[in-house]
Amino acid sequence: MYRNLFFDVDDTLLDFEAGELKSLQATFEKHHIDYTDKLEKTYLGINAELWRQYEKGTITREQIFYKRMRQLFKQLALLGDPEAVEKDYFTLVNRQAVLIPRVEATLEALRDYHLYIVSNGFESAQRYRLTKSHLIDYFDDIFVSDTIGAPKPTKAFFDYVAKRTPNFNPQTSLIIGDSLTSDIQGGRNAHMDTAWFNPHFNANHGPIYSTYTFNDFSDLLQIVKA
């Protein structure tokens, strides 16, 4: 039986994708730059690749924010100030708090368990967004990479979490998240069971596999209480 449940935030509890696109469009419109499908697709590709590099430990978090708009402006030959665009976008996106459907009801049904946050990002931003979405009181503690000094899925991240989780036992712990490379691989590194939240029914061709897969957030209850 599971005792400790560790949750990712972005695109697991909060719909980061929806907030991301809304913030991206608002930022470029503010700077009088045409927001096109090509711009959106190019940015998302650049950003995803930089976060993959961060998860592998080859770049820092700060380098993501330094590089992504600069790469976008260079690749699309955009006119303007990429540093100013990044600053405005960063502020907007870290204020977004759109709930994934059925998250709050599911967390309410899990009150008998010990719930924790495990997230890559900035602790101040995640606390703000969890407070804004009225989720923060469900969690015993919040573990974020900028405070820890190491990202998911590294062993250093999960060693930190294990040392600060009362009565931590990987056999009674479950990590829940949408990212195979960050959440699921991180759980595997920590010898925990894993639940992959896959609302878009994406195919998984390996090599990273989860203990469980679920597509609607409320289905997590069947996994935890089985």
Image (tube, rainbow, N blue to C red):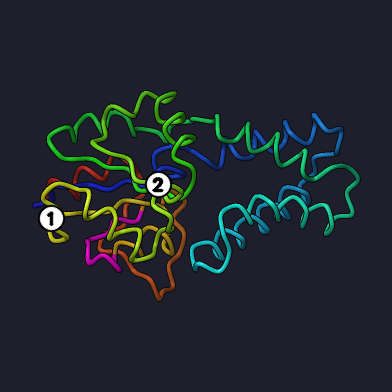
Look at label 2 and name its amino acid.
Val
Q: Residue at x 41, y 32 (%)?
A: 127
Q: Quadrant of residue 91?
A: top right
Q: Position of residue 190 (x, y in %)?
A: 26, 65
Q: Mark 1 vs mark 2: which is more N-terminal? A: 2
Q: Residue at x 43, y 51 (%)?
A: 145
Q: How many marks?
A: 2
Q: Is residue 183 left or right of residue 88?
A: left
Look at label 1 and name its amino acid.
Thr
Q: Is residue 19 left or right of residue 109?
A: right
Q: Quadrant of residue 201?
A: bottom left
Q: Which residue is mark 2?
A: 144
Q: Magenta part of the protein: which range?
A: 188-196
Pick whichever, 107 or 120, lies toward us. Answer: 120
Q: Is residue 49 left or right of residue 11?
A: right
Q: Position of residue 26 (x, y in %)?
A: 72, 31
Give the answer, above or below, for where 103 lies relative to 208: above
Q: Position of residue 214 (x, y in %)?
A: 32, 52
Labelled pair 1, 2 in contact (Cβ < 8 Å)? no
Residue 190 lies within the magenta run: yes
Q: Of circles 1 and 2, which is in front?
A: 2
Q: Which residue is mark 1?
A: 172
